Amino acid sequence: GQSLEQPSEVTAVEGAIVQINCTYQTSGFYGLSWYQQHDGGAPTFLSYNALDGLEETGRFSSFLSRSDSYGYLLLQELQMKDSASYFCAVLTGGGNKLTFGTGTQLKVEL
Amino acid sequence: KAGVTQTPRYLIKTRGQQVTLSCSPISGHRSVSWYQQTPGQGLQFLFEYFSETQRNKGNFPGRFSGRQFSNSRSEMNVSTLELGDSALYLCASSWGNGGDTQYFGPGTRLTVL
């Protein structure tokens, strides 16, 4: 089966940098995605890594190491609006089947 | 471009009833996936439809079923509802190639009494 582990909660101050780690065990791995979800909202796509290395999109960056079955999401210059849950998800098999981690609740404080 | 829409947004049913949820994908998207989100189990994949065919299936009982129409709109049906089926049901659409970005709709909040 598939399993993903990520911290349940992270707290940081506004303006800081935070890293959310994700380790996975899966078969048929295609790539690792990250989604953000605010309370009461729908998950929104942040990034996707199919190959090893760092992908940067504005204040957010995501990293993947396939050999270590590990990835992380890096959020820089934290803002209050970044307070949300962040999910890593592995894409496996053909098509678009995503298996999600349990989510990390990020709290940004003043 | 309009996003993914889901109807209804909220639904209350009683045990034993059945329910049908609808999802309209982004125009041009051919893949629709369904997920169940609960506080205890998190986000779980139900199934994916592509070009009217089920392409992937999660580990849910046969009471959960779905279909996709020629215009890519999709419906999912849950029969013989149980209390544990209370959840947020999300659909996500994408172009259809593996690894596409999936865009989620706002979800349908189902409460089973």
Image (cartoon, coloured by chain):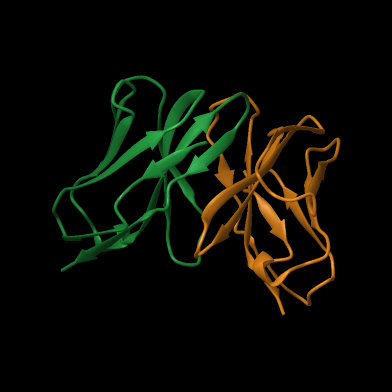
Chain colours: A green, B orange
Q: Position of residue A66 (x, y in %)?
A: 34, 22
Q: Nearer the viewer, residue B73 or A2?
A: A2
Q: Quadrant of residue A94?
A: top right
Please say if B1 is above or below A26.
below
Farthest residue, direction front: A1
Give the mark count: 0
Q: Position of residue A25 (x, y in %)?
A: 41, 33
Please say if B10 is above or below A17.
below
Residue at 83 percent across and 60 percent down: it is: B79
Q: Nearer the viewer, residue A60 or A103?
A: A103
Q: Position of residue B42 (x, y in %)?
A: 50, 56
Residue A57 makes an appearance in the image: no
Quadrant position of the C terminus of chain B in the picture: bottom right
Residue at 78 percent across and 45 percent down: it is: B74
Q: Nearer the viewer, residue A66 or A18?
A: A66
Quadrant position of the N terminus of chain B in the picture: top right
Q: Nearer the viewer, residue B3 or B62?
A: B62
Please say if A105 is above or below B101.
below
